[in-house]
Image (cartoon, rainbow, N blue to C red):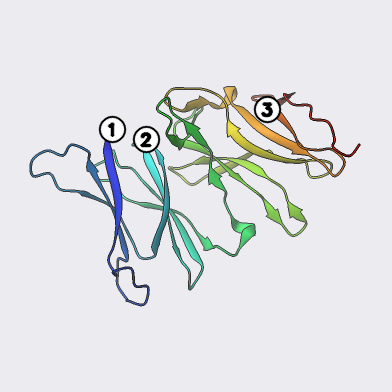
């Protein structure tokens, strides 16, 4: 995808009391448009635009939210496809922590931009990683899901130790200039702590999920 701009325009003048549909429109246009070229409408939203995460031009995750109803929606759109149809991935209440699917794991490009890390595996599909706090009635249990953006199917490939340690995924450290990572070569930076042990950092390596400790901070109150 060539250098591209995207922006959002409200259709209600920023006044939430105005009844209008759509409420926000997401546009896209080449940074150097051709003569007569008009902005492309990527997505029309009935709620308020909140944020978006890009995976180059392959797809974009767009989030919308409405404060009165607490409804939040996540859409997937494919800017590189001319006849793309937005796909609704999630619709839930923002106050329902138990149903939170997590947020995409990001990767930094050589230019310093953050984009969604794309996961490659043997079967076809556009896969990403979703990490979340994993709220449950018995407490949080952070997780990592392999998510198929095309089908909406997900597979839990890692979950924090529920008995002794509290672990969290911090970042992908598998390097690829286009942020494409083979699942069986995945490397993650994770933190690990317990009620008796302070936070230490590890590299978790797939496919066997081997952990390599990279810090050994002393306990401040031994």
Q: Is residue 39 found left or right of 211 in the rendered image?
A: left
Per the rendering, the mark at residue 56 is 2
Sooner in the amino-acid sequence: mark 2 or mark 3: 2
For the N terminus, the image quarter is top left
Which residue: 25% across, 32% down?
2
Residue 63 placement (x, y as % from top left): 43, 54
Residue bearing mark 3: 204
Q: Is residue 182 found left or right of 214 in the rendered image?
A: left
Depth check, front residue: 31 or 38: 31
Which residue: 68% across, 54% down?
135
Occupied quadrant, residue 125 = top left
**Residue most extreme to the right:** 222
Residue 26 placement (x, y as % from top left): 30, 54
Occupied quadrant, residue 170 = top right
Work out how far the residue at label 1 is from the one at label 3, CA to CA, in angstroms.
Answer: 33 Å
Which residue: 33% across, 68% down?
14
Q: Residues within 10 Å of mark 1 (few under 14, many from 20)?
A: few
Per the rendering, the mark at residue 35 is none
Residue 217 placement (x, y as % from top left): 79, 30
Per the rendering, the mark at residue 1 is 1
Residue 131 placement (x, y as % from top left): 59, 43
Q: Residues within 10 Å of mark 3 (few under 14, many from 20)?
A: many
């Amino acid at each position: 995808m060539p250098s591209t701009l995207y922006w959002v325009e409200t259709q209600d003048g920023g006044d939430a009391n105005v009844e209008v549909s759509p409420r926000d429109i997401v546009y896209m246009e080449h940074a150097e448009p051709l003569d007569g070229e008009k902005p492309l409408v990527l997505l029309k939203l009935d709620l308020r635009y909140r944020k978006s995460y890009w995976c180059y031009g392959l797809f974009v995750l767009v989030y919308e939210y409405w404060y009165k109803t607490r409804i939040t929606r996540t859409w997937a759109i494919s800017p590189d496809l001319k006849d793309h149809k937005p796909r609704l991935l999630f619709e839930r209440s923002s106050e329902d922590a138990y149903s939170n699917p997590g947020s995409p794991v990001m990767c930094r490009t050589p230019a310093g931009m953050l984009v969604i890390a794309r996961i490659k595996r043997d079967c076809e599909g556009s896969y990403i990683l979703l990490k979340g706090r994993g709220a449950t009635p018995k407490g949080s249990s952070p997780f990592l899901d392999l998510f198929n953006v095309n089908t909406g199917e997900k597979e839990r490939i890692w979950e924090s130790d529920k008995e002794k340690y509290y672990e969290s995924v911090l970042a992908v450290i598998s390097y690829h200039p286009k942020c494409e990572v083979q699942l069986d070569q995945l490397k993650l930076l994770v933190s690990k702590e317990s009620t008796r042990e302070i936070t230490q950092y590890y590299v978790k390596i797939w496919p066997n999920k081997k952990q390599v400790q990279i810090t050994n901070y002393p306990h401040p109150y031994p």
